[in-house]
Image (cartoon, helix red, strand yellow):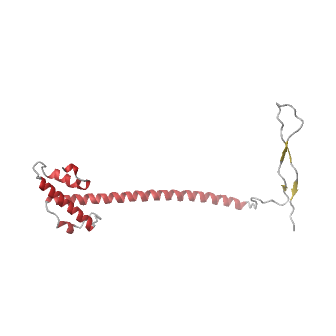
Amino acid sequence: MLRYLPKRFSIKVTFITEAKDLKSLAIDELIGSLQTFEINLEDVKRNKIKVGTAKVDDENLDGNLDTGLDEEFLKTYKVEANESLIAEELDNFVKVKKELVGTKLMLKKFNTRSSKLNEILAARKKEPIKGGLGFVAIGKAVMESPIVFVKASGLKEVSERPKPMFFKLSKKTVHSRK
C-alpha cells in the first residue's frame, strides 16, 4: 500500500518503514498517520512557512504534532527544505556566475579591440593623411572614362582565341582654382 502513495508522502513512508514493523501495524493506524501528515503538509503550505537560514516556525507546527514519528518527520522536513533552498540558491549563483563570466569576456574583447583602435589612430596622427574615398590630391591624374576592351580583328584560325586589347582613353589633370 505504501508503494502506491504520491511522491509527497515519500518522506513519511520512509519514516514509517524504518520506525515500525509494517506487519504489526494496523491499516487504520497507518491511514490515520498518513492523514495527519497530509493535514500538517497542507497547513505548512497554507501558512507559507519559509525555511530560511535553517529555521522554521516551530510554534505553528508544535500544536499539530501527535507522535514522536511526526516530530522526526518535522526535523527531516526542515533539513530537506533547507537543502532544497540551498540547492536553488546554488543554481542561481551558477547562472549569475556564467552571466558574469560572459560579460567579463565581452569586456576583455572590447578593451583589446579598443586598444588596437587607439594604436591605429595614434599611428595615423603621426602622418596626417587627408585622403579618403573620393579624395583627389591636387596635381594627380584622374581617369575620366573606364578602360575599354576591344576585340582584335583578322584572326581566322579557330584554335587561336582572339586576345583582347585595352586602351586608356584619356587623362585629365586636376588643378586647384583660387
Residue at screen point 18% across, 53% down: 15
Q: Return the x and y of residue 99 as percentages of the image width and height.
A: 46, 58
The residue drawn where x is 16% and y is 51% is: 18
Q: Which residue is drawn at 22% across and 50% down?
A: 4
Q: In this view, does 74 lie to the left or right of 173?
A: left
- Residue 66 spot, x, y in % from top left: 14, 62
Q: Is residue 176 above or below residue 6?
A: below
Identify the residue at the far left of this view. 24
Point 17% across, 50% down: residue:
17
Which quadrant holds residue 88?
bottom left
46 sits to left or right of 69: right
Give the total of numbered labels.
0
In this rendering, does residue 71 appear at all?
A: no
Position of the C terminus, as image quadrant, is bottom right
Quarter occupied by residue 30: bottom left
Residue 49 is situated, as x and y percent measured from the top left of the image, at 27, 66
> Residue 37: image x %, image y %?
19, 59
Residue 110 in view, yes or no: yes
